[in-house]
Amino acid sequence: MTHSPPGERVSARAIPSLRSDRTEIELIWIEKRLEHWIRFGRVADERIVSRKTRILAFRPDALIAFVRWSANDYGTIHSRIDILRAVRPGEAYTTVPFVRPGGELLLSIEGWPKVRWALELIEAIEAVGLDPSEVAPDHWRHAHNRLSAGEPVRAYTPERHKAWLRRKALGQ
């Protein structure tokens, strides 16, 4: 094993994968400059790369909300939320920065007002006692389309969730 000279940054891509069947997301935290975080999702494994970087791994079919935010001396310059499903080996996927290999993109919104709106949707789901990582993928697609158009999103209720669980149990 070779080691880098002290102070040299090693790309996370050069670090071996936790497991080949997992989706990995690289989280970075540079206070007030660059922040990547997971809003929801069940973490299967974690590896700390440095004080500012860690890599989380998720099992196939896990639903994950990945938020990216960056700023400069004048304020926010980029904000984005992606809700994706971790893919199984061999499945088609959409590439997303900092996500390896990628995922099935259910919702992808950028711009702070819309990102804030998406975060409020997640909070509303939690407020009725549901786990956002168990919500029907179709709801996140619906939310993506409505948020993109600047339209209100239909509420995800416990009744809708029960219907989703029944449909899921039937294998559809």
Image (tube, rainbow, N blue to C red):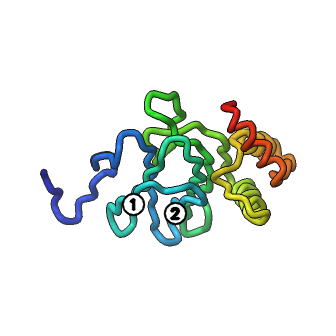
- Give x and y (percent) for residue 62: 55, 46
Q: Amino acid at mark 2?
A: Glu
Q: Residue at x 62, y 56 (%)?
A: 79
Q: Earlier in the sequence, mark 1 or mark 2?
A: 2
How far apart, in angstroms, are the residues tagged by discs 1 and 2?
12 Å
User: In which quadrant of the rendered view does residue 73 lie?
Assistant: bottom right
- Disc 2 packing (10 Å; few <14; some 14–19; many ≥20): some
Q: Amino acid at mark 1?
A: Arg
- Give x and y (percent) for residue 119: 70, 59
Question: Which label sits in the foreground, 1 or 2?
Answer: 1
**Residue at numbered disc 1:** 54
Could you say which is closer to the camera, residue 111 or residue 102?
A: 102
Check residue 16 in the rendering and tell me which mark sits there, or answer none: none
**Residue at numbered disc 2:** 35
Residue 144 shows in the view: no
Q: Residue furthest bottom?
A: 31
Could you say which is closer to the camera, residue 168 or residue 59?
A: 168
Q: Residue at x 61, y 67 (%)?
A: 75
Residue 13 shown left or right of residue 28 in the figure: left
Q: What element does badge 2 sit on?
A: strand
User: In which quadrant of the rendered view does residue 30 lie?
Assistant: bottom left
